[in-house]
């Protein structure tokens, strides 16, 4: 296909670009100790939490942003960001959906998330994060019966300080990296999940994130702990309204799986990627790490990434427990001028640990993406095994995909397999489908969805359908 | 049904077809033979609308319509089907899914609604049985890991489901064992009717024993240099192409 034709086709508009007008009470831009004290106080936090934040802040001051990622972006002015924003009267938070600001509900409607119906239909507990404060939480009771704690991290800090204190920062230490340190200092919200010993969480847990107030960085902090033999499946989904300034997002997600526990963490991410020139998109610098602390524990990351102007993200697993299992299934789609540098790290520490990595990258337009994967086998990881497969699909001839697999093998009994392919969306495949009467856009979506199949089938059923739809919206007009 | 007039085609400035003429009427089966690289696949690809070919001169009418004004998918929906010499693999896309999407696209173009699922299942089961294909092939990804012969049978399966007006089958016999050849031939024969036409590209007379052509053409250097009835295929089998070349040069 001719490249100018491609060019024209790759353009598409962001379908979820709109802004909800809710007054925010926002601190003035800038970051110093008093900003942090303000946040901590607003959240009604105990002293130890404030100290923990300040400690992180001091570490952050000494750090420099990572420069090795295969990304280009102007330096971020951290003093130009305002670090707290919440709906006007947090103390008057609605107790049920009826009390929720109709404008907010409207926003969810536009996003295709009719919360009330959807939650009931899908049996999903939804902890909706709007700006930085949880507005509504459903299915609390059912979870409560099972003994599962699912609430905002702020609430957890107030209500379950012992649990939070025991696990917070044990997977991603305060000074782990530049963005994690920043997050540790200023995080405003996020989710907390604790599943007690032997409990299988009775429903999928799901949080919708949405960035709204202009010029406000979002610093989510999520902590999920699965006690012995416990299981949980958690889905995170994000969309953001169209904006002119780049918005920084630096989240931290920590997962802890004790003996025989299983955490499945799925992400469907659809942040505003910016206009054709990349203007106005979200900067997404996320630290996600799972700790398979107990023997035979298992952590599985599944992600479908379609948004952001810039994504920098490596969900990882620390495989400490004997025979613990780490999995990473990823589809990353970039279009326009998006840049993505993603991948995973599997750190094999315990004996007989196993990991699987399946990464699918789809690049269209003038976008650029890199897969960066580290498989590290420690000296004690006898008989550890890894299987890695990364495939890239290019649509058009102005995009790029790069693969950087790193391996550090410290144990000769380990088995590490790596397969990688890069293919251009074959004109031949398109022609084949079209010569059967299928129009070009449908053909592309069919081929791309086929390409992603191995990953989609790891998603919880309801979300697999959504992911497919999302992929189609993202690539809409990328050919056709 | 199909009228190709004075067709000139170049690929990357190299002339491939040089004034080709071909007329196929409804109800007829035509066979095109000719040496490797003569332009046989090019002809069917240009008729189907593949990118990368420049038509420098000539016209192609399909049922009186100028084909160059139609998109690839429009041609397919109008009843043109190309059976590929090298069917492509589409990982992750189920065979049955492609079949259904194709059939529904064609139905939509005819103003018909989507085919009801039970009816569709019945149809594809029936047709796969005709092609002696295990139903498990329907659940596999399109052509992925299919043997050469299985890919060819899959092309015919698609043809049987889509029921094109004009089927152009490019070397549908290559890579087929003797039994598969019979299965494919009977599939093609079942499509023969007064209102359909078939264009076979083949190197071997063998196929034509099973599918009897009304006309046989010899394509050399981008032109049809000789046409005849089915006897011509026998003669080519016996004598090769040189005499045709000499005759046409004379
Ligand atoms: N994309 C292309 N670029 C360059 N040359 C091409 C291209 N496509 C076809 N050709 C050339 O055009 C000529 C005709 O090719 P075509 O595939 O039509 O031959 P054919 O008659 O089908 O041969 P065969 O019997 O081997 O299948 C060949 O010389 C081929 O190399
Ligand atoms: Mg050929």
Image (spheres, coloured by chain):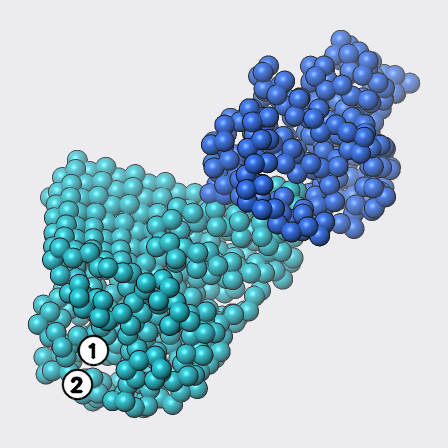
Chain colours: A cyan, B blue
**Pointers 2 and 1 in contact (C-beta within 8 Å):** yes
Looking at the image, residue A375 lies above or below residue A313? above
Name the chain under label 1. A
Task: Name the spot of residue B80 as percent of width and height, x first.
Answer: 73, 39
Q: Determine the chain carrying the residue at label 2.
A: A
Q: Which residue is mark 2?
A: A44
Q: Which numbered dot is residue A305?
A: none
Residue in the image at 58% along x and 19% along y: B180
Label 1: how many Cα within 10 Å (few below 14, some 14–19, many 20+): many
Q: Is residue B186 left or right of residue B239?
A: left
- The CB of the residue at mark 1 lies under 8 Å from ligand 1: no
Residue at point 15% right, 41% down? A352
Q: Is residue A166 left or right of residue A153?
A: left
Q: Does the beta carbon of the residue at mark 2 sit less than 8 Å from ligand 1?
A: no
**Quadrant hosting residue B174:** top right
| Count of marks overlaid on the render | 2
In this rendering, the answer to whether B155 lies above or below A70 is above
Residue under the image location 28 percent in, 45 percent down: A356
Tell me the distance, in whole angstroms, between the alpha carbons under discs 2 and 1.
8 Å
Q: Residues within 10 Å of mark 2 (few under 14, many from 20)?
A: some
Of the two numbered discs 2 and 1 on the same chain, state the one appearing first in sequence. 2
Q: Nearer the viewer, residue B4 or A237?
A: A237
For the C terminus of chain A, the quadrant is bottom right
Question: Position of A274 compared to A259: left or right?
Answer: right
Q: Which residue is mark 1?
A: A154
**Depth order, front residue of A388/A60:** A388
């Amino acid at each position: 296909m001719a490249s100018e034709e491609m060019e024209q086709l790759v353009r598409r508009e962001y379908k979820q670009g709109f802004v909800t007008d809710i007054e925010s009470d926002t601190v003035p831009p800038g970051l110093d100790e008093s900003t942090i004290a303000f946040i901590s106080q607003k959240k009604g936090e105990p002293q130890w939490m404030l100290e923990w934040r300040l400690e992180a802040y001091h570490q952050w001051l000494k750090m420099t942003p990572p420069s090795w990622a295969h990304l280009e972006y102007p330096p971020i002015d951290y003093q130009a960001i305002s670090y707290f924003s919440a709906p006007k009267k947090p103390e008057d938070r609605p107790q049920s959906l009826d009390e929720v600001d109709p404008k907010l509900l409207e926003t969810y409607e536009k996003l295709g998330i009719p919360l009330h119906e959807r939650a009931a239909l899908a049996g999903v507990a939804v902890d909706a994060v709007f700006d930085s404060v949880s507005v509504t939480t459903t299915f609390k009771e059912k979870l409560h019966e099972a003994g599962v704690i699912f609430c905002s991290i702020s609430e957890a800090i107030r209500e379950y300080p012992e649990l939070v204190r025991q696990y917070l920062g044990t997977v991603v230490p305060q000074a782990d990296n530049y963005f994690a340190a920043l997050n540790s200092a200023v995080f405003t919200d996020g989710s907390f999940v604790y599943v007690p010993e032997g409990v299988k969480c009775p429903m999928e847990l799901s949080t919708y994130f949405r960035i709204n107030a202009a010029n406000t960085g979002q610093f989510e902090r999520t902590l999920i702990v699965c006690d012995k033999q416990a299981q949980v499946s958690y889905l995170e989904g994000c969309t953001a309204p169209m904006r002119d300034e780049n918005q920084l997002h630096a989240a931290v997600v920590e997962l802890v799986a004790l003996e025989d526990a299983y955490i499945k963490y799925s992400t469907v991410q659809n942040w505003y990627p910016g206009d054709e020139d990349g203007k106005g998109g979200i900067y997404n610098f996320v630290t996600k790490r799972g700790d398979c602390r107990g023997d035979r524990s298992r952590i599985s990351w599944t992600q479908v990434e379609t948004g952001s102007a810039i994504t920098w993200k490596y969900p990882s697993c620390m495989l400490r427990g004997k025979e613990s299992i780490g999995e990473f299934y990823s589809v990353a789609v970039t279009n326009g001028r998006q840049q993505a540098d993603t991948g995973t790290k599997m750190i094999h520490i315990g004996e007989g640990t196993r990991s699987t990595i399946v990464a699918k990258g789809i690049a269209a337009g003038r976008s650029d993406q890199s897969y960066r994967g580290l498989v590290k086998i420690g000296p004690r990881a006898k008989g550890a095994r890894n299987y890695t497969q990364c495939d890239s699909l290019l649509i058009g001839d102005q995009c790029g995909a790069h693969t950087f697999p790193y391996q550090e093998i410290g144990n000769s009994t380990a088995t590490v397999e790596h397969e990688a392919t890069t293919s251009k969306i074959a004109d031949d495949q398109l022609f084949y489908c079209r010569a059967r009467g299928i129009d070009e856009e449908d053909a592309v979506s069919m081929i791309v969805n086929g390409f992603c199949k191995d990953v989609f089938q790891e998603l919880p059923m309801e979300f697999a359908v959504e992911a497919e739809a999302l992929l189609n919206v993202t690539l809409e007009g990328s050919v056709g | 049904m199909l009228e190709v007039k004075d067709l000139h085609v170049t690929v990357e400035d190299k002339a491939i077809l040089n004034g080709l003429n071909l007329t196929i009427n409804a109800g007829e089966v035509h066979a095109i033979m000719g040496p490797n690289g003569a332009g046989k696949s090019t002809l069917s690809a240009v008729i189907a609308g593949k990118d990368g070919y420049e038509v420098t001169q000539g016209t192609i009418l399909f049922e009186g319509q100028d084909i160059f004004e139609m998109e690839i998918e429009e041609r397919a929906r109008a009843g043109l089907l190309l059976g590929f010499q090298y069917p492509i693999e589409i990982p992750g896309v189920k065979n049955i899914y492609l079949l259904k999407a194709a059939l529904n696209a064609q139905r939509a173009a005819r103003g018909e609604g989507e085919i009801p699922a039970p009816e569709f299942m019945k149809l594809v089961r029936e047709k796969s049985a005709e092609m002696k294909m295990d139903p498990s092939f329907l659940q596999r990804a399109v052509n992925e890991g299919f043997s050469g012969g299985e890919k060819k049978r899959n092309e015919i399966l698609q043809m049987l489901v889509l029921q094109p007006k004009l089927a152009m089958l490019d070397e549908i016999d290559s890579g087929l064992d003797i039994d598969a050849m019979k299965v494919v031939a009977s599939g093609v024969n079942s499509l023969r009717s007064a209102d359909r036409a078939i264009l076979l590209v083949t190197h071997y007379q063998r196929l034509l024993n099973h599918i009897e052509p009304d006309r046989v053409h010899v394509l050399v250097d981008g032109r049809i240099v000789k046409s005849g009835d089915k006897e011509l295929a026998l003669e080519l089998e016996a004598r090769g192409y040189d005499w045709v070349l000499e005759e046409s040069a004379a």
